[in-house]
């Protein structure tokens, strides 16, 4: 049994990560792969409990960037140990909605934690388990906000920040993609969901390959 592959989806709120995740699952399963969908923060019972604390802090309370960075990394440790690594070892393809790049971005923008500290935490927690491919979804902030508004639902602690924050997040994700081109593919997510899925699939085929009917 060969190892599975680890693909992460990153980008600002409303860029279409969750939508793309579902489309990629279908395509991978059609290609004969065992697929596991998961998300961050979260993915395991303990990590979901941390997610709730981070995204919905008690009324009137705000986490500092450093506290958030530590909580995200604590959640990620549990997620890697209990879900992601076992799934990869069992040969599954793991598709994760947000991962370590979201911590690089959200916990550093607007005078957050220094990149050096975040990198040290990241490498300590990930060890050898870096994604094989990271799809970074990029769309104009207003377009992404419009999609979120149409989707409805209640806003969490990150969604409530202002437009300057979302512009900084967008640029920081672009910077991540440019800084690690071997791992990351920047995807223009302003197009239709079908076109975005097609572009993402092309990246998966080119970079991770091996879909010519084999089920390995
Ligand atoms: N390419 C697209 N074109 C138009 N609408 C889209 C596209 N992709 C997703 N949507 C719609 O936009 C909304 C947000 O998409 P989605 O929930 O996938 O984004 P997300 O990146 O997962 O957001 P969040 O960060 O808030 O979880 C949904 O209503 C979805 O149906
Ligand atoms: Mg989502």
Image (cartoon, helix red, strand yellow):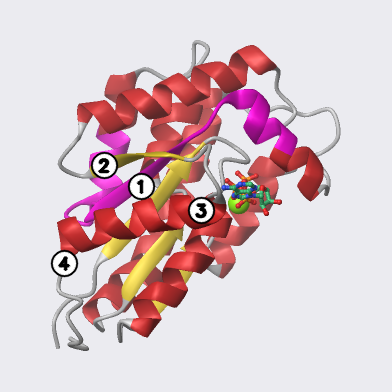
Decide if residue 182 is on the left or right side of residue 188: left
Mark 4 and mark 1 in contact (Cβ < 8 Å)? no
Separation of disc 3 and disc 2 at Cα? Answer: 18 Å
Residue 135 - label: 1
> To which quarter of the image does residue 185 belong?
top left
Q: Which residues are magenta?
A: 120-146
Task: Indicate the secondary structure of the residue bearing disc 2.
Answer: strand
Mark 2 and mark 1 in contact (Cβ < 8 Å)? yes
Task: Indicate the secondary structure of the residue bearing disc 1.
Answer: strand
From the image, tell me which residue sits under label 3: 40
What's the residue at 28%, 62% (across, down)? 6
What's the residue at 17%, 57% (across, down)? 206
Mark 3 crowdedness (10 Å alpha carbons): few <14, some 14-19, many ≥20: many
Decide if residue 178 is on the left or right side of residue 57: left
Mark 4 and ligand 1: say if the CB distance to the nearest ligand atom is below 8 Å: no
| Closer mark to the observer between disc 4 and disc 3 | 4
| Closer mark to the observer between disc 4 and disc 2 | 4
Nearest to N terminus: mark 3 or mark 2: 3
The number of numbered discs placed on residues in the rendered structure image is 4
| Closer mark to the observer between disc 3 and disc 2 | 2
From the image, tell me which residue sits under label 2: 184
Nearest to N terminus: mark 1 or mark 2: 1
Separation of disc 1 and disc 2 at Cα? Answer: 6 Å
Query: Residue 143, how many percent across, how many down?
Result: 65, 31
Give the answer, above or below, for where 95 lies relative to 72. below
From the image, tell me which residue sits under label 4: 209
Mark 1 and ligand 1: say if the CB distance to the nearest ligand atom is below 8 Å: no
Give the answer, above or below, for where 63 lies relative to 195. above
């Amino acid at each position: 049994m060969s190892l599975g592959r680890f693909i992460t989806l990153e980008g600002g709120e409303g860029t279409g990560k969750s939508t793309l995740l579902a489309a990629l699952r279908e395509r991978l399963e059609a290609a004969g792969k065992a697929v596991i969908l998961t998300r961050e923060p979260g993915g395991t019972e303990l990590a979901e409990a941390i997610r709730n604390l981070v995204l919905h802090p008690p009324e009137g309370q705000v986490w500092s960037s450093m506290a958030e960075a530590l909580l995200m990394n604590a959640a990620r440790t549990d997620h890697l140990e209990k879900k992601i690594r076992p799934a990869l070892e069992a040969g599954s393809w793991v598709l994760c909605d947000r991962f370590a790049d979201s911590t690089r971005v959200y916990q550093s923008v607007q005078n957050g934690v220094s990149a050096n500290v975040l990198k040290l935490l990241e490498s300590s927690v990930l060890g050898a388990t870096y994604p094989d491919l990271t799809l970074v979804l990029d769309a104009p902030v207003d377009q992404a906000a419009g999609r979120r508004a149409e989707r409805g639902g209640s806003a969490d602690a990150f969604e409530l920040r202002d437009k300057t924050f979302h512009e900084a997040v967008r640029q920081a994700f672009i910077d991540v993609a440019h800084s690690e081109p071997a791992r990351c593919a920047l995807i223009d997510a302003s197009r239709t969901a079908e076109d975005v899925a097609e572009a993402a699939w092309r990246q998966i085929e080119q970079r991770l390959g091996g879909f010519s009917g084999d089920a390995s």
